[in-house]
Amino acid sequence: MSSENNRAHVARYLEHLEKQRKLSLHTVRNYGRDLGDLLAFAEAIPSKPALNAITQFHIRKLAAQMHAQGLNGRSIARKLSACRGFFDWLAESETIAANPVDGVKAPKRDKPLPKALSPDDAVRVVSESRPGRDAQSASELCNRAMFELLYSSGLRVSELAGLDVHYAKEDRYESAGWLHVEDHEVEVTGKGSKRRRVPVGQPAMQAIAAWLAVRDTLVKLDPHPLFLTERGTRMSPRVIQLRLKAHAQALGIPANVHPHVLRHSFASHVLQSSGDLRAVQEMLGHASIAATQVYTSLDFQRLAQVYDAAHPRAKKSTTEK
């Protein structure tokens, strides 16, 4: 009976995340997978305890099992965070002495620096046509507009894919993001359902205008999306990833270029030029300034490379004994 009750509690919590907190279906599914591990763990305990009887000892054992299975610190921390939120919610209706996840920490994890293209390579990726392709075809004009906008505004690929030509609200549909042509801005819905407006540079606006001139020839079923496939359907994040990767490879860019690389490049290049960390935070849609501060490390990394290459005392002499 406790197993059925446990599953019912998790199902109600996921419904709460979707209906009350308005999290995206993708995020809710991720929570469901993480809490599924908690359910499986509780089911494997001989006594099969109810979730309100789970203790900190159990959670520490769960974290140790995940570590033994080879999960990295980031993944374990994410799963613990999902469990912590669930137990906070459960405490509102069940008797729990304390949240069993409090005080349990995941193993320390590495914090790799985001990979950014050089300014020259970034400009090449977004401005040059793919060799052997008709630069004026609808497909190439769409690619050019998408790539320019990714680098111009630092959008997440999901935010780019969710853009509409104009704001629309009808029946059960409401735009998650849209283009403000007159203001040279896009309005997007980021993480936590938070909306923000981000400026769009002139080259990106020109690329979007060229794409819009031919876009209507592809509209078949859905008139809302800004970016469309050849079949007239909304461009998916996965298709954008594949197109960008193939485009960069065709140009001979020596890096694995994906949409988040252009987002990193946008952030690091704007920060290097302006030094305005708070403005970059706002444009990226980061809830915490700490998430944006990682880009300052890219600056120090670049300076260190310049120092090593140029400073006489940074070079190791082959004549030293």
Image: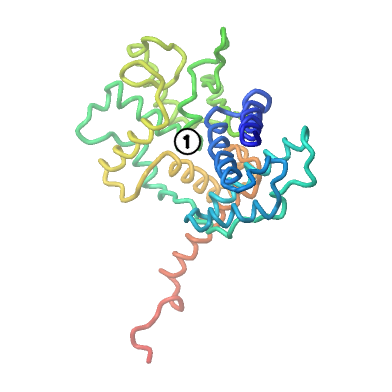
Q: Residue furthest left?
A: 132
Location of residue 17 (image quadrant): top right
* Disc 1: CA contacts within 10 A as few (<14), some (14-19) or many (>=20): many
Q: Secondary structure at mark 1?
A: helix
Image quarter hosting the N terminus: top right
In the picture shown, does residue 104 fall above or below 39?
A: below
Image quarter hosting the C terminus: bottom left
Residue drawn at 34 percent across, 41 percent down: 124
Residue drawn at 67 percent across, 43 percent down: 49
Instruction: Report x, y in % for residue 287.
Output: 65, 40
* Residue 195 appears anywhere in the view: no
Report the colour scheme: rainbow
The number of discs equals 1
Location of residue 220 (image quadrant): top left
Q: 315 and 286: which one is in front?
A: 286
Q: Is residue 283 left or right of residue 206?
A: right
Q: Residue furthest bottom?
A: 321
Residue drawn at 79 percent across, 39 percent down: 95
In the picture shown, does residue 242 fall above or below 183?
A: below
Q: 207 and 160: which one is in front?
A: 160
Q: Residue furthest top?
A: 171
Location of residue 232 (image quadrant): top left
Q: Is residue 202 left or right of residue 195?
A: left
Q: 6 and 155: which one is in front?
A: 6
Instruction: Report x, y in % for residue 89.
Output: 72, 35
The residue that label 1 is drawn on is 152
- Please, what is the three-letter code of the amino acid marked with disc 1? Ser
In the picture shown, does residue 138 fall above or below 274?
A: above
Instruction: Report x, y in % for residue 2.
Output: 66, 36
